[in-house]
Amino acid sequence: MVGEDIFTADFKTDPLWWDDVPRPRPPAPPLPSRVDVVVVGSGYAGLNCALVVTRAGRSTLVLEAAEPGYGASTRLAGFIGRFLHYSFGKLTKRFGLQRAVRMFKESGDAHWLLLELIEREQMEVGKLYRGRFTAAHSPQAYEALARNAEEINRHVPFDFAMCPRSEQHREIGTDYYHGGMILHEHGTLQPAKYHQGLLDAVARAGVGIAAMTPVTRITRQADGFAVLTERGTVQARDVVIATNGYANTQPTTPWIRRRIIPIPAYQIATEPLSAALMKQIKPGGRAVIDSKVNIYWDRPSPDDARLIFGARTGDKADDLRVMARRLRELMVEVYPQLSETRLSHVWQGMMGFSFDRLPHIGRTRDGVYYATGFCGSGLPLGTYFGQKIGHRVLDDSQAETAFWNLGFPTWPFYNGNPWFLRPVMAWHDRSDRRGRPGIARAG
């Protein structure tokens, strides 16, 4: 019996992904006095932007407050999604049918661009391309999933199938859900390996990366910007902000900070499971995201040996071991077969959400470029919008996007501290428990 001893002897409060790819500690040479482009943030968006502009001949420096990829890029679940987590009908009402179709098509393009990049740069990323099961947390949610999928499919065709509750045991070994949707063009990868592949690519291209170099201020000048850091000042013609969920840690961009809600998300990894037990809970081998607002998600590890389970977005955890116990209770509620399973890892990462739940790419009045607000889809969207903002800096033909300079809302008096997050998520929890349709996910 596991009892109170739910942790393995080598239990860690770092991501499972770091076991294979430890955080690099690059040297800290003197900063250059001037470059063409400064990119703030070394996640997927920042590195992809740097790769684009450097290969076009621009001198580029990436500034990172911690180790490269210390944030969400090496902490997230590694889901390769296809579409926005957004109702197609709501998007149409807001922007009109033509632009809504363009947005959903582009979010699909982000998926294929990611896969093409991995192939072109010959990255080994632990990819499992088996599809995804979007699990309905109530009968009403099942119907909402089906309606949204059919509406998307009429305008942007994609490969999906509805799976009623009577047949869901072919996909997931649980009675917790009420059927769901099988999304065939989806997968997972090892996020830290993908990030390392990007680091290798930018190194080959000649991008400079200054780790452990927090930015303290960005000042507009006649010929560009002065970027002040704790290690010195760099002059740059263009500046790109790509900090996403960590925007509130940067005092340099209050305009962006006021528009991004940093939302913590937590994940646990089990000890290695037997092949038979893994087959019980994952007969289809697919990743799962459910339809609640405060979602549960899970996936097999790249070697099919462990289950990674995530939940409790928006909670604050001073002790990750306490959070690990909460997550394990939820995991066992979904998969009772894991009641005797210990945990080997728990970790936290920060997602960057916008108030309108859409990704944003644009330029501030001061001329600073940004790509941010990926709303839990940072793997494909961070890659895509990082490249798009790079092409925008170059002012070339590949910069066009339906997301450029959307209205970027905020709340009065919000300064980057999401004081409202806990009561808002508690309200969503109550709504989820009542079975109300949450996010009609096809992404």
Image: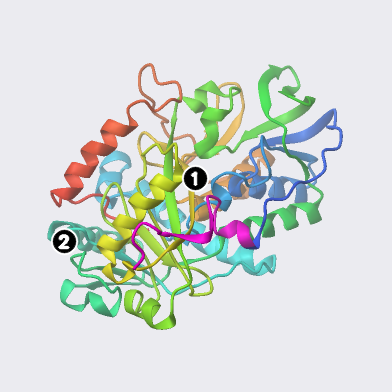
Tell me: residue 119, above or below residue 5.
Answer: below
Q: Position of residue 94 (x, y in %)?
A: 29, 39
Residue at horizontal 44 percent and vertical 53 percent from the top: 267
Residue at horizontal 56 percent and vertical 63 percent from the top: 190
Labels 2, 1: front one: 1
Label 2 sits on what residue type? Glu
Q: Which residues are magenta?
A: 1-19
Tell me: residue 366, above or below residue 12.
Answer: above
Q: Position of residue 439 (x, y in %)?
A: 27, 50
User: Total number of numbered labels?
Assistant: 2
Q: Position of residue 418 (x, y in %)?
A: 39, 28
Q: Which residue is mark 2?
A: 143
Residue at horizontal 24 percent and vertical 58 percent from the top: 148
Gap in angstroms between the C-alphas marked 2 and 1: 32 Å
**Res 376 seen here:** no
The one of 408 and 330 positioned closer to us in this rendering = 330
Circle 1 crowding by C-alpha within 10 Å: few under 14, some 14–19, many from 20: many
Q: Position of residue 322 (x, y in %)?
A: 39, 45
Label 1 sits on what residue type? Gly
Q: Are marks 2 and 1 in contact (CB under 8 Å)?
A: no
Q: In the shown orientation, is residue 212 left or right of residue 116?
A: right
Q: Earlier in the sequence, mark 2 or mark 1?
A: 2
User: Which residue of the protein is positioned furthest toward the bottom in this rendering?
Assistant: 276
Confirm whether the magenta stretch covers residue 258.
Answer: no
Q: Which residue is mark 1?
A: 349
Tell me: residue 131, above or below residue 5.
Answer: below
Q: Quadrant where the N terminus lies?
A: bottom left
Instruction: Determine the image quadrant of residue 200.
Output: bottom right
Label 1 sits on a secondary structure element that is strand
Q: In the shown orientation, is residue 314 left or right of residue 148?
A: right
Confirm whether the magenta stretch covers residue 15.
Answer: yes
